[in-house]
Image (cartoon, rainbow, N blue to C red):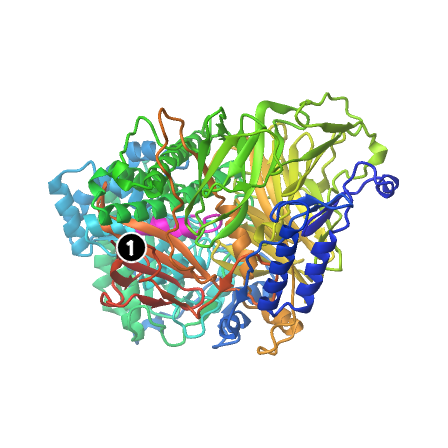
Amino acid sequence: MKLKKQVTVCVQHDPARHQNGGNFPRSQISVLQNRIEQLEQLLEENHEIISHIKDSVLELTANAEGPPALLPYHTANGSWAVLPEPRPSFFSVSPQDCQFALGGRGQKPELQMLTVSEDLPFDNVEGGVWRQGFDISYSPNDWDAEDLQVFVVPHSHNDPGWIKTFDKYYTEQTQHILNSMVSKLQEDPRRRFLWAEVSFFAKWWDNISAQKRAAVRRLVGNGQLEIATGGWVMPDEANSHYFALVDQLIEGHQWLERNLGATPRSGWAVDPFGHSSTMPYLLRRANLTSMLIQRVHYAIKKHFAATHSLEFMWRQMWDSDSSTDIFCHMMPFYSYDVPHTCGPDPKICCQFDFKRLPGGRINCPWKVPPRAITEANVADRAALLLDQYRKKSRLFRSNVLLVPLGDDFRYDKPQEWDAQFFNYQRLFDFLNSKPEFHVQAQFGTLSEYFDALYKRTGVEPGARPPGFPVLSGDFFSYADREDHYWTGYYTSRPFYKSLDRVLEAHLRGAEILYSLATAHARRSGLAGQYPQSDFALLTEARRTLGLFQHHDAITGTAKEAVVVDYGVRLLRSLVSLKQVIINAAHYLMLGDKETYSFDPGTPFLQTDDSRASHDALPERTVIQLDSSPRFVVVFNPLEQERLSVVSLLVSSPRVRVLSEEGQPLSVQISVHWSSATDVVPDVYQVSVPIRLPALGLAVLQLQPDLDGPYTLQSSVHVYLNGVKLSVSRQTAFPVRVVDSGPSDFAISNRYMQSIRRADDDQEQQMELKVLVYGTRTSKDKSGAYLFLPDSEAKPYVPKKPPVLRVTEGPFFSEVAVYYEHFHQVIRLYNLPGVEGLSLDMSFQVDIRDYVNKELALRIHTDIDSQGTFFTDLNGFQVQPRQYLKKLPLQANFYPMPVMAYIQDPQRRLTLHTAQALGVSSLGNGQLEVILDRRLMQDDNRGLGQGLKDNKITCNRFRLLLERRTAVSHELKVSPDKVHQEQEHSTSYPSLLSHMTSMFLNTPPLVLPVAKRQGASPALRSFRPLASPLPCDFHLLNLRTLPAEDTLPAADAALILHRKGFDCGLEAKNLGFNCTTSQGKLALGSLFRGLDVTFLQPTSLTLLYPLASPSNGSDISLEPMEIGTFRLRLG
């Protein structure tokens, strides 16, 4: 059957039925649409003429007999036609703004990770004591000219939730570590300690005395205690979105500045499972000068060690002038624990972990215990340790050496502090007393190490030391040994990966509306009436989202009880944020602000949906209709105006929807289904296309009404495929049931065979297949972290044929296919613009009866992708990937936080996602995504559990097909050249693709006005922006800053991102007005009804002003730049 919209989807079925017409809608497009399409193709570049023609067509239709001008209507051949809007849309992008994506500026870095991976053999040769490396040799004279300077850095890695919950870890371990730290560091000024997780530090700070706080400030001030990175957590870098990465960094940095007066200088990421190039960009923007990483594929570590490339300047792919460079240190060995940090031989290094002295609770697996250092043995022990230091030092370019000394939750008892510090100090004193050793050893912090390195190499902190390499790219995917690739966690517990993204969208929406509402309230002199408590709710939600970015939270790699704890926190914050949004919307929409009063007992608006528990899918609010009108507020969290289909659930099918001005709106009405064949009684879905203001609030009015010309019913066909089921029937809505047998359909796993744009002659062959992976039968099996499949995926074989439900209507049509373990809905919107140009897909997955299986979706096309595919990093940038045959299947999976695409010189197919999942392209023209995984055993990485707590999960996608145009004449670049350019360097989504991702990830919020006694106050729409933002600008956040933890300041952080985009993809029929401005934006005139009273550019997290506050309000951003501004509106 063909659903003919701007995209055509074919479901394979009996050809005879199709020719007779049968019950399927015909697929010819209306004559009117055809003519407009032809005109658009002929006159694509002349917006003015097209808009005149469209306007005249609309006038003719309006004056002729027939349906009203903006009403969809059935054409003679049975398909729905929706007239174009009378207002023209235009797309005006300057050629200068198109140059960026073509790249080719500046020097190419020596180390491009894509090339490194293609060149490396990945052969895993036995390397001696350093099993994954090689034997290291040196001459004792190597340090005659310059002493070896050793910094031993005591640290304790504290996971904010993993085996225990955050609170349990705090109570049982973390508070003792921090309490001991204060007393033990004060005993000797030579002692040092490194800490990273501000979430734990802030909780501890709230529970200590003023005297202890003063001591902590002194320790930070004199350099004994360093807070590294300074984020709320040490975040996962694979599944996290850059909104949340930035937010948890701001939360941590703001807390440190307020409470300790500390500004972090160095990044410390010892435990995330692979590293994203987004992190060095963000840390550099926050004014950090150096960073450290640890979990990198063992073969890459070995290669970098052999070529003295373990320390490098990490540069962004697009950077032509080294402005994004940050100095990065990669730890060379297997782990960050003591046996793997003093040098290449863990058997020896373990003997210098003095927590493992005989009689303690842990020992050395290599069977040689540490010995306490005495006068009698210090010479021998120091020589043994120095040999390791020297060998490790040979892997680096400078004679400054970093030796971390710590592990998970270390230093939680005073005895451990004493054992490590006393024994090491004896070793240092001995080594430093022997000039012939040419070594100076001491305790240090991470920044002391980096400072000494810069001093030795003669450069300013953060500058590139002479001869050190430049690197671009990322460090996914990670393997720690053999073929154990950590690619399972890209999908593990997808329910919570999805909930994370929902919370993030709500937080951003709540931040922006709250900041605007309080600014307007201040301007009107009503600030005192606005609920102060909302800022505390915002702060808690920031910290919840921040906590969940931890590398054992969003990753899905914590114990089941810890997952529940995270889930409860996420849901509590989601509910709070809905409250903040409702309070702000209430204030902003009141026609008469003087009538505003905050009553927490009776909220002005209802929420759009609710969740029965943290692990339940949302249930949408049903609007109860009676004789009096109901009002609905619709919030658009996007910074661009959007035309979207907004769906409401109502209690009666007899309803009329009016705009704010009282104009009737066309709606599509349908029954609401609870399963393949059951409808929910007395609940109906009303779908209304509405144009929503940017970051604004619109009002709809619902009135009871008999069937009028504006209420258009969906038609529904249910195909039972021979399955014996009864289908709910409603008198108001005829449902046609077809008991067709299996011979009528050959869809098995092929619902979609091809996809075609209505304005395109060529059909794009495409097939969706659902597949199942098993796990190995040998000792190592897949678990929460690892993906270890037993073979290639096998087709999903259903026990019985699927039930199909086909819905057809004027604004959307959809096919719902119900199988035992999933049901899939493919929806087409019949709207101009972003909604109509992509395919909406959702998969509701339930694999709770699976044993050691993973469910995957594979998209098969005839795009000639030649082994290259593209995945995003943190929703911030796109990284080219190459399918490597020399690596096992699981090694070719990568994180997909928001999108992945394949392309050839003619076409690009992008899979947009609303939740982070693992993705690959295992064959030409394919994209494959893992939907959920259920695994019965631990994978030996410390968790001690499998993945058995699966939930019913809804995964949401958009599929976008774009055509490559011959890039505009000014650029004189052929599509082939563009394809080659992007093979090995950078690639960018189109503006349409960016917009499609935003539509998917930030849906409009539909908030019914609560029923109340008496007349409802007058509401009017809220349009905060006086002029549109350039369409390559994204308003990442407008975040009210704290005066103290629970009280807001008048200032806000305005965070803007100027997106990089590819102009070489077709940009017609976009349906949104789009202009770019070469990165310029006039902030002074941006916010309607508010003045910019203070504006200052700052570092990413606002710790450093970048210029003095300006009177002017014009700002400028480079492509890809994230800019933060301290802003006061009033």
Q: Is the magenta region chiefly helix, strand or loop?
A: helix
Q: Can you see residue 143?
A: yes
Count of numbered labels shown in the rendering: 1
- Above or below residue 165? Residue 826 is below
**At x 28% / y 48%, what residue is drawn?**
520
The question of residue 241 being in magenta is answered with yes
What's drawn in magenta, residue-wise?
A: 236-250
Disc 1, SS:
loop
Structural crowding at the residue carrying mark 1, measured as other residues with C-alpha within 10 Å and reported as few (<14), some (14–19) or many (≥20): some
The question of residue 290 being in magenta is answered with no
Q: Quadrant of the N terminus?
A: top right
Q: Nearer the viewer, residue 803 or 497?
A: 803
Residue 964, image quadrant: bottom right
- Above or below residue 687? Residue 1108 is below
- Above or below residue 106? Residue 720 is above
Q: Nearer the viewer, residue 79 or 965?
A: 79
Task: Quickly name the residue at label 1.
Answer: 1090
Where residue 355 appears, as percent x and y from the top left, is: 31, 42
Where residue 711 appears, as percent x and y from the top left, is: 61, 36
Q: Can you see residue 407?
A: no
Where residue 940 appears, as percent x and y from the top left, is: 51, 39
Residue 310, image quadrant: bottom left
Q: Nearer the viewer, residue 75 or 11?
A: 75
Where residue 65 appears, as percent x and y from the top left, is: 68, 47
**At x 20% / y 36%, what residue is drawn?**
207
Query: Quick one: which residue is furthest to the left in this view?
Result: 211
Q: Nearer the viewer, residue 139 or 1058?
A: 1058
Q: Amino acid at mark 1?
A: Leu
